Image (cartoon, helix red, strand yellow):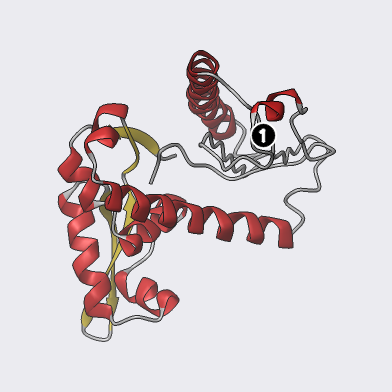
Amino acid sequence: MTLYQELHNPALVQAVAHPLRARMLSILQDREASPKELAAEFGIPLANVAYHIQVLRKLKLIKLVKKTPRRGAVEHHYRADFGAHIDNEAWSATPDVVKRSMVGGVLGEIGHDANDAAAIGGFDHEEAVLTRSKYVLDQHAWSELSGMITDVLDRADELQKEADKRLRANDHDGERRAGLVMMLFESMPSVPGADAAKMPASRASGRRKASRARAAV
């Protein structure tokens, strides 16, 4: 089970903002892998992956979990020790170019996860949820909605801890891998002017599922 830690230091935020490191961290939250395996998966030189692995290790975001002898050498396997989400103060102090890089990386991973899930029927369960809504809010409503999303994510972390105890006690019988994505962002108005506030929010029909990202890596 991967725990989550907040990143408070803008310099640390910038260190994990590299798209390749963000992708590595996402993969290593799900499974262990060696630099050689990641290099083959990404189609890039092993030396590049090894460098970024060392950066993540120094940040204490991944840890060495296994050493495997391979033809006179030793292959090191890593796994994420912590997922990471960024607190508001650190995010505010992060340069815009870094923010955009991080957002782009996270959105890319969300796209991969959602498409992979769709391909195997991950949205077919009757309790799965897939929605897309647009609202016109003032600052008070925006702040309240943001707080509600944070509460849902905090409760989701608690549910995972509770489920982990039950699964270990039941030899993982009934285990279900779930993805959760929640986003709140400023959007371009589809209908300009005050009349937009009179229009109902659009919402995808039916209940379906999602993938996971806080202001998160």
Residue drawn at (23%, 54%) of the image:
56
What residue type is disc 1 on?
Answer: Lys
Q: Is residue 17 left or right of residue 122?
A: left
Q: Is residue 109 left or right of residue 211?
A: left
Q: Within the image, what quadrant is residue 171 found in?
A: top right
Q: Is residue 204 left or right of residue 93?
A: right
Q: Within the image, what quadrant is residue 13 found in?
A: top left
Estimate the x, y position of residue 185 in percent, counting from the top left. Answer: 51, 37
Confirm whether residue 74 shows in the render. Answer: no
In the rendered image, which residue does mark 1 sit on?
134
Q: Is residue 216 above or below residue 111?
A: above
Depth order, front residue of 201/98: 201
Outermost residue, bottom direction?
71
Disc 1 on helix, strand or loop? loop
Depth order, front residue of 125/166: 125
Residue drawn at (79%, 40%) of the image:
204
Estimate the x, y position of residue 179 in percent, counting from the top left. Answer: 59, 43
Q: How many marks?
A: 1
Estimate the x, y position of residue 106 in percent, counting from the top left. Answer: 45, 52
Q: Is residue 120 above or below residue 184?
A: below
Quarter containing the N terminus:
top left
Residue drawn at (62%, 33%) of the image:
170
Depth order, front residue of 1/92: 92
Residue drawn at (43%, 56%) of the image:
104
Tell me the crowding category of disc 1: few under 14, some 14 to 19, or many 20 or more residues within 10 angstroms, Cα based: some
Depth order, front residue of 189/133: 189
Confirm whether residue 175 shows in the render. Answer: yes
Estimate the x, y position of residue 16 in percent, counting from the top left. Answer: 26, 51
Q: Is residue 147 above or below residue 81?
A: above
